[in-house]
Image (spheres, rainbow, N blue to C red):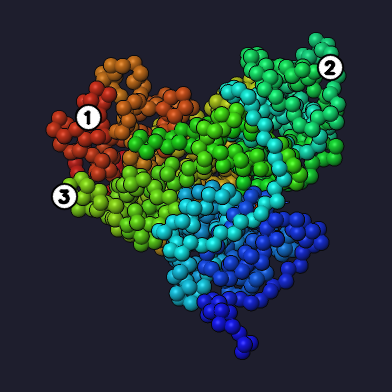
Amino acid sequence: NEKMTSDQDKVKKREPAEPAIFIPVDRSPEIQEARLKLPVLAEEQVIMEAVRENPCVVICGETGSGKTTQVPQFLYEAGYASGSGIIGITEPRRVAAVSMSHRVAKEMNLPTQVVSYQIRYEGNVTSDTKIKFMTDGVLLKEIQKDFLLQRYSAIIIDEAHERSVYTDILIGLLSRIVPLRNKKGMPMKLLIMSATLRVEDFTDNQKLFRTPPPVIKVDARQFPVTIHFNKRTPLEDYTGEAFHKTCKIHRMLPPGGILVFLTGQAEVHTLCRKLRNAFPFRKGNRTAAEDEELETSEGMRKFKKAKQKKTVSLPRINLDNYSALPVDEGDEDREAGIGDEEDGDSDLDLGDDTADTEEKADPSIPLYVLPLYSLLAPEQQAKVFRPSPPGTRLCVVATNVAETSLTIPGIKYVVDCGRVKKRFYDRVTGVSSFKVTWTSQASANQRAGRAGRTEPGHCYRLYSSAVFGDFSLFSEAEITRRPVEDLVLQMKDLNIEKVVNFPFPTTPSAEALVAAEQLLISLGALKEPPRAGSVKEMQRASLSSPITPLGRAMASFPVSPRYAKMLALGKQQDCLPYAIAVVAAMTVREIFEDLDRPAQNDNESTKLIQRRARLTQMRRLWAGQGASLMLGDLMVMLGAVGACEFARCTPKFCEDNGLRYKAMVEIRRLRGQLTNAVNSVCPEEGVFVDPKMNPPTEHQVVCLRQIVLAGLGDHLARRVQAEDILDPKWKNGYKTPLMDDPVFIHPNSALFKTLPEFVVYQEIMETSKMYMRGVSAVEAEWVPKLLPQYCHFGPPQESPGPWFCSSTGTVRCCRSSTFFRVGWQLPAVEM
Ligand code: ADP
Ligand code: MG
């Protein structure tokens, strides 16, 4: 060792605390064999060398190359979890955090106490945990508690290409934390893993890393995928198109799984149903629900109809003659004109193959059809990893969850609709809408890549190459598409006052940052800047407002600032458990079954009408009457949570009452978590979760309404007065300060018939109209007391404040002009 060259010397000096250990892992032979086939294994040496020599390393590799499952194991074996520090991996999706932790535990033959996961409302982390999978939001919360992340010796940011907001922020924060840790002699490693190759936002970003981190490309050993474009401009009905294409593949092409990309849950179910009918699967293997679905479904009805008509099946085509689908231009052109939309029964007019697939498909080779989307129950999701029953062909119908985070084994054919459903958010008006748009070239290529994992594959794009040429190259970073008040608050809590200067991989617009700070100021989370100087000066000042004690309390609650404010206020008048339940219900996605779900066929439609009526009645019951009804849709949520808990939250209760079981379970956990969070801010209160709480008293309902108003103050709307209605489009419409057009109470809302004068809403969704969701009634005289910052006090004609303009432009002030400055404690409730 004395003869060590000076070069080696330098290496040694640069990284003194490097572990030089090897921790053996006891893997089963089958697992070991499967691992050796993964491309990332070939790069283990290179990766670990780079990790040893650099604080930050970027790893790029196709989906399925083994990054997520293997890289944590490399670090483990190299001793990164052998000391006091552990290995953390962040995922943008909960599904991935949970399923990957299970997979890695299994591969390493270690219990889940050692390879664990933590997502917002659940986890199995113990003091023995060495490898911890978590959602990116969970790690962000941990940074708030311990900026140096001293528990970790290495952090892996997975799926960085997805550009989720939290991932972006984490990379920005870690770009500062890692050098700080090294400076303090507690070295930490950062690994950024990404699927597609656009990593320049991370590497060539002076704000992030002064010396660009090395990028290791994992040779994907991807098999060639032949891309087949549609010739013509695509139909609107891409689900129908996907059906035909899938049928063709199944009937004509050699074995191999089919993966279909659609945009949403409803489409996924529609297609699954159609495919199951076209190629029925042995009854014994079907679940009761699937049986019922089949019995009532369109395909079965048609199948019976077809039998009555005694349709003669045409001879089947010999599979051996086809290496790929005959998707030539003529075919596609011919297909274009045909199709009886009314019947949903379009023909597949392709040479010998002239057949109505639904009616004449040879059902002798069953298709094992599985749906996959993020709201699907976990045990249903896990099915895609299991081998399909012998003698069947696997067909997974998925949303873009299957694009990168989960790799489904055995896929040879991909059918890509080329679209994606995205939430759009209008920064000015705050209106959200889900729109189906074209995806990006990068993600279309990702989808195609799913077909070449185990052997050469085929990707059928349901759009033309010209359309593909018009796709944007990459998907936009999420941070540029959504409000950022939650991030700004989190950052302020980390004492990052000038959020504009934060090293974002992609910086949100100044406009979005200003809007966020202003909302936080009005919620009392940030200090109000001095009201002096020009608008520009004030804006600049308001971009660096320090956080208030209330803001710190709010930042410690794992919900967005509006809801955090409600929790902070919930202590009042013994209604904290209710406030927590309401907030939990508002933050969980889609707790109610959609009453407007279209029926699949006549048969189902009678059933559905009955069910709709029953569920509507149930929701009316939950909303209550009189005082409680005024809490509106939030009372329905509260009633649903209460009723569900009284019934012990069983799947059956949820199914019978139109509640999504997974959502209800999440609400229960979130209630526990929020209660703990509130308790840790003000422990003397001693609040505990009471799973079965009695309905709130009238007094408590009034408190709740005020709390909701204080949190959703910027979402206040006023019904347009009859005398102001000049244009019929304003009938029953509500005016909000920022929009020129009316917004409405949805027919399914508890307050649809009541039409209170003032309401607050959770959000505005644009569907057939601009509808307010989560509506609750408020009393006019509360507004100046609770939200003086939004009110104009004085004669209406003098200064037209933004708030209570009628459609005709007449300013209507609040009835009360008493000025109450309130802190973050509500004044006593007036009954
Ligand atoms: P990457 O992160 O590069 O996309 P992964 O590490 O997720 O790759 O996947 C590597 C391999 O492990 C894939 O072939 C995938 O099919 C397999 N795999 C992942 N999860 C499971 C699981 N739960 N069961 C069986 N195989 C799995
Ligand atoms: Mg992965």
Q: Is residue 761 above or below residue 247?
A: below
Question: Do labels 3 and 1 touch, CB within 8 Å?
Answer: no
Q: Is residue 491 left or right of residue 212?
A: left
Q: Amino acid at mark 1?
A: Arg
Q: Looking at the picture, tell me which residue is in the foreground, 585 or 544.
A: 544
Residue neighbourhood size for the residue with mark 2, other residues' Cα within 10 Å, grouped as few (<14), some (14–19), many (≥20):
few
- Foreground: disc 1 or disc 2: 2
Question: Do labels 1 and 2 touch, CB within 8 Å?
Answer: no
Q: Amino acid at mark 2?
A: Leu
- The outermost residue toward the bottom is 2
User: Label 2: which residue?
Assistant: 314
Residue neighbourhood size for the residue with mark 1, other residues' Cα within 10 Å, grouped as few (<14), some (14–19), many (≥20):
some
Upstream in the sequence, badge 1 or badge 2? 2
Q: Position of residue 175 (x, y in %)?
A: 46, 62
Which residue is depicted at the point 67% across and 22% down? 329
For the residues labelled 3 and 1, the Cα–Cα distance comes to: 29 Å
Q: Amino acid at mark 3?
A: Gly
For the residues labelled 2 and 3, the Cα–Cα distance comes to: 82 Å
User: Label 3: which residue?
Assistant: 533
Tell me the number on the disc at residue 812.
1
Which residue is depicted at the point 67% across and 16% down? 334
Work out which quarter of the rendered image holds the C terminus and state it.
Answer: top left
